[in-house]
Image (tube, rainbow, N blue to C red):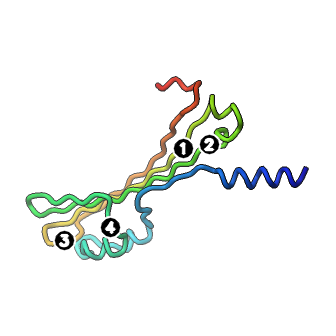
Amino acid sequence: MFRFVMAAAAAICLLSGCASSGTKVDPAKVQAFQRGKTSYAEVTGALGAPQADALADDGTRIVTYSYAHAQARAVDFIPYVGLFAGGADAKVTGYTFTFDKDGILVSYASVSGQNSVNTGLFNSGH
């Protein structure tokens, strides 16, 4: 019985259906950035290339980093049950940095949230 339980646990770990996308930003790195001092090059050097980089006609630049991690629900891996009650849960984080025309950090903001997707036949789609 113990071997069966261990094999089942290993299978669940191997099939644990998760996916990640984007750039996960370390809040400690963001805390080190100083408004009025930190440059665009320093931010992108520390965090990597942003997912979005917008340049306004006045020279203001806004860059965005976003990250999402989705995990399939355990019920998805139960035969037949997953077909009726399946889904996934996702956690999303993001940072937006605004730079002046000289490329110096003016402000930044963060956002985080959670989202659920229901895929089972019993989910009404509302």
The part of the image, by quadrant, that contains residue 37 is bottom left
The residue that mark 1 highlights is 89
Mark in front: 2 vs 3: 2
Q: In this figure, which residue is indicated by the disc labeled 4?
A: 49
Residue topped by disc 3: 103
Tags 2 and 4 touching, CB below 8 Å: no
The percent coordinates of residue 121 (x first, y second) are 58, 26
Camera-side residue of 97 and 52:
52
The residue drawn where x is 52% and y is 49% is 70
| Mark 3 burial class by Cα count in 10 Å: few <14, some 14-19, many 20+ | some
- Residue flagged by tag 2: what amino acid is it? Arg
Circles 2, 3 touching at the beta carbon (< 8 Å): no
In the rendered structure, which amino acid carries the disc numbered 4? Ala
Q: Earlier in the sequence, mark 2 or mark 4?
A: 4
Label 1 packing within 10 angstroms: few (<14), some (14-19), many (20+): some
Q: Position of residue 56 (x, y in %)?
A: 13, 58
Residue bearing mark 2? 73
